[in-house]
Amino acid sequence: MPHWRWILRNLTRKLWFRATLLGLLGVAAAFFALVAERFIPYSLPGNIGADAVDSILNIIASSMLAVTTFSLSVMTSAYGAAASSVTPRATRLLVEDRLTQNVLSTFVGSFLFSIVGIVVLKTGAYGDRGRVVLFVVTIGVIALIVVMLLRWIDHLTKLGRVDDTISRVEEATRAALAGRLASPWLGGRPLNDPDQPLPAGLPVRADRAGYIQNIDMASLSDRAEAMAGDIHIVRLPGSFVHAGTVLAWVGPSPLPPGPVDDLSDAFAIGSGRSFDQDPRFGLAVLSEIASRALSPAMNDPGTAIDVIGRQARLLAFWAANETVEPAKAAEYPRLHAARLQDDDLMDDAFMPIARDGAALVEVQLRLQKALAALARIGPPQFRAAARAEAAMAFRRAEAAMTLQDDVEWLQRVRRSEGLAEP
């Protein structure tokens, strides 16, 4: 996606951004009563005293400050629990949780509304009609606070728990897979062999080390049209690069090297991977959660088995919608990009689990059955990748298991599932 949209989306996911917006809205609401007074008829039913409104605003100010402080401490504890019991890579999804941000932003906005309302009220700027408007707005703010508190109480029962965090990672991974399925070549045309240098092509090299987080395909397409040449992208989002790594090839063309020097600006390189354009990262994070659950400190094979089922669902979704050839005209016809490889997805999803759970027969049984199910669906290369992953997992288990009966049990399951010769 264009860099400006990518930067804007990352900005809107920050807690401070949403809190700032709702804080400004709270300040605006306090001044709204002052402005709206001019447009209200002189005859209003009832009369609101300044002391009544001042008391309510004081209660909101003191309570919202305490609730916000308490909520921040609870949120920080949940992040720490998720980082220690699941994986630090998953805490980013907790930080970007919209409900948490909306609740905290509402509390901050309500606090600012009450503070500004008290200050303006003490100056005597509100007349009789203005106090009525301020009172009505205050009632609305109280109703909003009550709704957010009820949602926050329910949300706190799940925030930071293992199953909730795993579900968040699964949803983010599914969204990334769906995005890549909708645009297998990032809007361009297929690149057959990304590991083969382009004959007579000009290399576009990275200028720093890090992970590719976003590729501005629209910008690259505009440059390709201006140069009347094709751009072959060989590094996808999620790839780790360093200074001098070839990101793309331009050509083959007799163009001089000058026009391609700044094409690397279209590749956003950062210190970490993101879930958005990198489906492999989500699969790797899920696998990391299972590996941590299989460690001697955690000793939780049930979580690993749960992750195997989630990985199988995600890859089944990928296989059911995977395309090998473009079904429609490319959005950027001068750009060529590689597609995700099925064997890479299999390794990201299952290799760490097969390695760390090699000696646990219950984990290996679930793993072989999941891979057998995947070996029956999708295109031929996907089925072959699933069978190869199952064979590798069995070899690891065969080398790690100390009881021959477990190995024979696993072998019988493989034969019954069609993964081994009878």
Image (cartoon, rainbow, N blue to C red):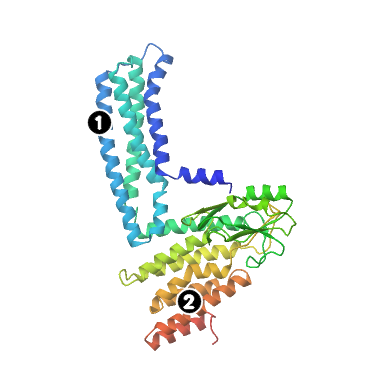
Q: Is residue 132 above or below residue 230?
A: above
Binning the other alpha carbons within 10 Å of mark 2 as few (below 14), some (14 to 19) or many (20 upward) gives many
Callout 2 secondary element: helix
Q: What amino acid is at disc 2?
A: Gln
Residue 161 makes an appearance in the image: no
Residue position marked by numbered label 2 in the rendering: 368
Quadrant placement of the C terminus: bottom right
Residue position marked by numbered label 1 in the rendering: 59
Q: Where's residue 245, x and y in %? A: 57, 61
Q: Quick check: 127 left or right of 182? A: left
Label 2 vs 1, first from the N-terminus: 1
What residue sits 29% from the left and 36% below the top?
64
What residue sits 43% from the left and 56% below the top?
168
What residue sits 33% from the left and 37% below the top?
107
Question: Of 297 and 360, which appears nearest the observer?
Answer: 297
Callout 1 secondary element: helix
Question: Of 300 and 262, which appears nearest the observer?
Answer: 262
Q: What amino acid is at disc 1?
A: Ile
